[in-house]
Image: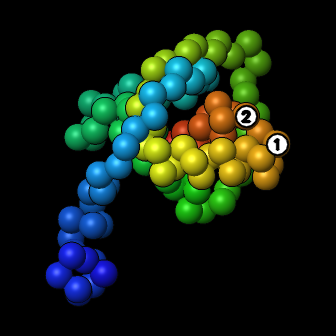
Amino acid sequence: MDVWGGKMNVFDKYLLKKDNFVRRRIEIDNSLYEQLNKLVEEYDASINKMVNIAIIELINSGNIAIYERPENEIVEAHNFAIRETEYLELEKMKNKYGLSIYKLINIAIYNALNS
């Protein structure tokens, strides 16, 4: 339902609702980050927005398949503003699956890039 009492509008389909953000420094596999960096040239979105969308998709799909990290993968820490609502869901998933937040975010990015 939208603010007018009707069904979802076109903006609901393509835009994220406002939310508070949690600022975190997250370790991201370098190969995943480089792929996101290339997509910045193609999409009207920052890496930060793409990561948030990947997290939302992970939460909605529940696809927690562990992927094989390439051997000798470099991991770099990056600052992200993660939507508070989704961060709270990540914390629930962390407790449920016994995986760290950074691992869940890497899985979310991997899934989004390979969907």
**Most foreground residue, 79 or 30:** 79
Q: In the drawing, does residue 34 fall left or right of residue 76? A: left
Q: Residue at x 70, y 50 (%)?
A: 93
- Which quarter shows the N terminus? bottom left
At mark 1, the secondary structure is: loop
The label shown at residue 10 is none
- Image coordinates for residue 43, horizontal then vertical, percent: 27, 40
At mark 2, the secondary structure is: loop
**Most foreground residue, 15 or 33:** 15
Residue that extends furthest to the left in the rendered view of this protein: 4
The crowding category of the residue bearing disc 1, from other C-alpha atoms within 10 Å (few below 14, some 14 to 19, many at least 20), is: few
**Could one spot residue 41 in this view of the protein?**
yes
- Image coordinates for residue 91, horizontal then vertical, percent: 66, 45
Residue 7, compared with residue 66, is above or below; it is: below
Q: Residue at x 66, y 40 (%)?
A: 104
Residue at numbered disc 2: 100
Are dots 1 and 2 in contact, CB under 8 Å? no
Residue 20, compared with residue 89, is above or below; it is: above
Q: In the drawing, does residue 6 fall left or right of residue 114? A: left
Q: In the drawing, does residue 70 fall left or right of residue 76? A: right
**Could one spot residue 115 in this view of the protein?**
no
- Image coordinates for residue 6, horizontal then vertical, percent: 23, 87
Q: Which amino acid, by three-letter code, is at mark 2? A: Ser
Distance between mark 1 and mark 2 Cα atoms: 7 Å
Residue at numbered disc 1: 98
Q: Which amino acid, by three-letter code, is at mark 1? A: Gly
Disc tally is 2
